[in-house]
Image: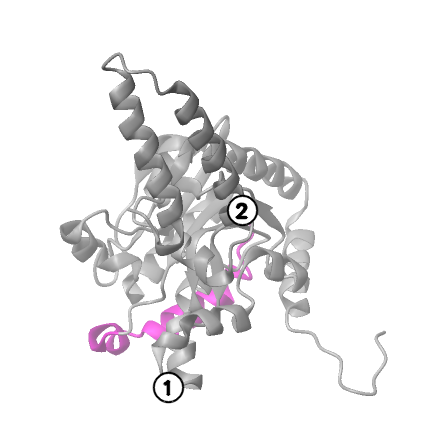
Amino acid sequence: MALEFEKPIKEIQQKIAELQKLSDKHVEFDPEIKKLEQKLEAIKSKVYKNLTAWQRIQIARHPKRPYTLDYINMMTTEFMELHGDRLFADDMAMVGGLAKIDDEHVMVLGQQKGRDTTENVKRNFGCAHPEGYRKAMRLMRIAERFGIPVLVFIDTPGAFPGIGAEERGQAQAIAENLRDMMQIKTPIIATVIGEGGSGGALGVGVADHVIILQNAYYSVISPEGCASILWRSATKASEAAEALKLTGEHLIKFGIVEEIIPEPLGGAHYDPTQVADTLKAAILKQIKRLKALNDDDLLEARYGKFRKVGQFIEAGQKAS
């Protein structure tokens, strides 16, 4: 699947493939293929190194992009999935369980999207219900009890806004997670691997160290939702994406995330193993750092991190 801005790249790749087929039939096209390959690399570099915020969002939503379970399978061993919130149901949009990352025992959890229509219906397109957030908190409590770190993979357009979800306390479930994650006495490391939409993402995003992949985004609202409110038209989503400052570079500046993991040209789906290896190394480094802190220092640092988000200086004031 080629995104709109990737079409010039795909056209050259198709020409190269056609010439390579002809070359297999004893016709010499090596010089032409070499020229096209050089042209391809130049265009790829130009396109992918100058992406707009809206183009990054399109890559974050790419259907071939690795999802939570993909990263769990690539980065961990001995994964044992745990189910249910012990109150209502097992939300398949939120997955989690015990695993090992190298020699470290961890609790991993995150939103899971589907690869096809059937799985997307089963996973509710990665939009968790209140029982999903309650399951996530149950797993974090287990991690706290046994003193093992929590690894969170964030990838959701937002929490599910349906009537049933609201009747079962969607807003309360997210609010309780925000409160309780601030007090969990074990290291929490969150990574935005694709979409980081609204309270649905923040409901499992209160972490000691927040990482974002290069082409992921983290925002209070989707660009389409923002455009519908401000311009009364979702067609202004690209303008909203720029205004929301939702890419890693802006989020680092604002203190919302601490680290950006680079992706190969085109996105994580071009080389998932490389991205998983880089992310794994970053997570292991943070586990080692955070485990060295005692509980009081860990919670104080987590609280201070989020208290700093959103600071501003009024006109006429001097920065302290």
- At 30% across and 26% down in the image, what residue appears? 19
Residue sitting at 23 percent across and 15 percent down? 25
**Magenta region, residue range:** 162-189
Residue under pointer 1: 232
| The C terminus: image quadrant | bottom right
Q: Residues within 10 Å of mark 1 (few under 14, many from 20)?
A: few
Query: Extreme left residue here?
Result: 118
Provide the secondary structure element on which disc 2 rests.
helix
Magenta stretch contains residue 148: no
Left or right: where does residue 18 sit relative to residue 255?
Answer: left
When asked about the image quadrant of residue 305, the answer is bottom right
Residue 188 forms part of the magenta stretch: yes
Q: Is residue 7 visible?
A: yes
- Give the residue drawn at x 59%, y 53%: 208
Residue at the (23%, 59%) spot, across then down: 124
The spot of residue 82 in percent (x, y) is: 29, 44
For the residues marked 2 and 1, what is the alpha-carbon distance in whole angstroms?
Answer: 33 Å
Residue 105: percent from the left, percent from the top?
47, 33
Residues packed near mark 2 inside 10 Å, few (<14), some (14 to 19) or many (20 plus)? few
Q: Position of residue 79 (x, y in %)?
A: 34, 34
Say what amino acid the circle numbered 1 marks: Arg
Q: Is residue 220 above or below residue 98?
A: below
Front of the two marks 2 and 1: 2
Q: Which mark is residue 46?
A: 2
Q: Amino acid at mark 2?
A: Lys
Dominant SS in magenta:
helix
Q: Is residue 212 left or right of residue 168?
A: right
The reply to whether the C-beta atoms of the residues labelled 2 and 1 are less than 8 Å apart is no
- Residue 76 appearing in the image: no
- Name which of mark 2 and mark 1 comes first in the sequence: 2
